Image (cartoon, coloured by chain):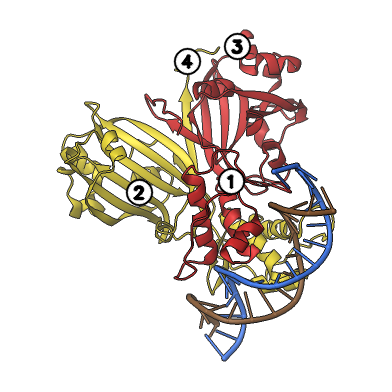
Chain colours: A yellow, B red, C brown, D blue
Amino acid sequence: MSAELPPIDRIGDHPLYLQVKSALQTVVDDGALPHGARMPSESTIAGHYGVSRHVVRQALERLVTEGRLTARHGAGYFVNHRRIHLVLPSLTSFSEAMRTAGVAAELRVVEQGTEEATPELRHKLRATRAQRLYRLLRVGAADGEPLVLVEAWYPPRVAKSIDGAAIDSCGVYRQLKAAGLRPSRAENQLRVSFVDPPVAPLLGLPWGSPVIVTNSLTFDQDDRPMEYVRELYRADRFVFDYGSNSERRPQP
Amino acid sequence: MSAELPPIDRIGDHPLYLQVKSALQTVVDDGALPHGARMPSESTIAGHYGVSRHVVRQALERLVTEGRLTARHGAGYFVNHRRIHLVLPSLTSFSEAMRTAGVAAELRVVEQGTEEATPELRHKLRATRAQRLYRLLRVGAADGEPLVLVEAWYPPRVAKSIDGAAIDSCGVYRQLKAAGLRPSRAENQLRVSFVDPPVAPLLGLPWGSPVIVTNSLTFDQDDRPMEYVRELYRADRFVFDYGSNSERRPQP
DNA sequence: AAGTGGTCTAGACCACGCT
DNA sequence: GCGTGGTCTAGACCACTTG
């Protein structure tokens, strides 16, 4: 039942921990171990290769950072799922995008309420200093596993059309549509970042795991900003697909 | 001349190495140290806080992975630049995209030649088993610092319009345009990955650093695949803007 | 030659989860 | 209780750059 551990060289210019990492990666990538399978323990691997536990940890840490393994304190290292494809940019709702990707996911409200706006947010949403913003924090999960964090802010004129208690069942976009607010365009950004201590547990990730962060400022049919959304996608679980057509600028 | 190192608690639930990391991050983020500045050495920091070198390394390693610092063997740790904004999707050439972003960058050819195609590539570019593909590997750099790796494959009918010796001066897109080949649309993907040993030195990155990988299959005006491009952007140096009417944002 | 980061060993204690 | 991963110490040797 124990996984077959491929041999390593122990010579050459490659550091030991990278040789061990490659060996373990082979086991994971070749599908010899399916999702959820447990890896041999640190000390087992160390004994098998005759190296110190520190070397094995360096190898395993990298695989965790790369999202191939998940470490569970006191339990072991476990093999992860492969990636989900999402379409970018998405003017559609998250739930819809996930449905298109063939993943049964649900968004659950974690926090909501009105808050004072930071100067930057106030500027983006064209809110006055006196106005407070409605903030909504949700976690998207599939199979009970958190995948994405969605944090949204709405100016008062939009927020008044949102029924906080009905979000989980009705979604926000549907409520806004019913109120006559329709998204027309968006300004988006995408970057790679790393989760901080306060955010990490919400995504079930260790501190410092990479995430794909998107920021979207959406405008309604009258070109007024209607929402600002920040989404944190687990970098190990997503691929973004996008297209382009020939309405580009002329080449030099 | 030595940087002021903020104090740490040494108590509470936070691990030591995260306290040290936060302290160092403060120094970097507050702009107390400009781009290129050298951090105190590992042993200096360890002595200052009265912790082992291992703890300091854990802190520094994270900052390196997150792209805030660069480690140079035998020299020290150095503070990095902030990020560059690129527009996504870019049917335009890389050079043009960088120029738009306000960065003086140049693409340099590293490898080129015809090669046998993998089955996957052959399928994408609709090449026959007998056909060989023209492969072009370039590195994009600014200020002598490598930022992106661009690997492109062309089917024979396209490759015959490319003058390999003139790429550095003329660019590929300009040559193809002169030959009557114009990109009309593209299928793109974006994901986060981590550099392997063979690639890492080309980007001047340590093994395992995160990169944003885009794959683009471009079609010409007759909807025939004309090139397949894989680009590896240093995750610590880029932000991608996308969406209709995406505006330029100033560099932070 | 001195100083720096990169790798590795051997050991310790703790917090956590579970056959 | 025992095995697991998480943190930390003390020390060693090597490879690299030149602060």
The chain letter under disc 2 is A
Q: Which amino acid does label 1 sit on?
A: Met
Pick the residue in front: A161 or A26.
A161
Q: Which amino acid does label 2 sit on?
A: Val
Report which residue position mark 3 lands on: B177
Quadrant hosting residue B141: top right
- A180 relative position to B158: left or right: left
The chain letter under disc 1 is B
Pick the residue in front: B243 or B84.
B84
The chain letter under disc 4 is A
- Dot 1: within a 10 Å radius of its alpha carbon, few (fewer than 14), some, or many (20 or more) residues? few
Q: Which mark is residue A150?
A: 2
Pick the residue in front: B237 or A3.
B237
Task: Same chain for labels 2 and 4? Say yes or no.
Answer: yes
Residue found at the very far front of the displayed protein? B1
Circle 2 sits in a helix, a strand or a loop, which is it? strand
Are circles 3 and 4 on residues that touch, CB within 8 Å? no
**Residue A28 can be seen in this image:** no
Q: Residue B1 carries which label?
A: 1
Report which residue position mark 4 lands on: A249
Are circles 4 and 1 on residues that touch, CB within 8 Å? no
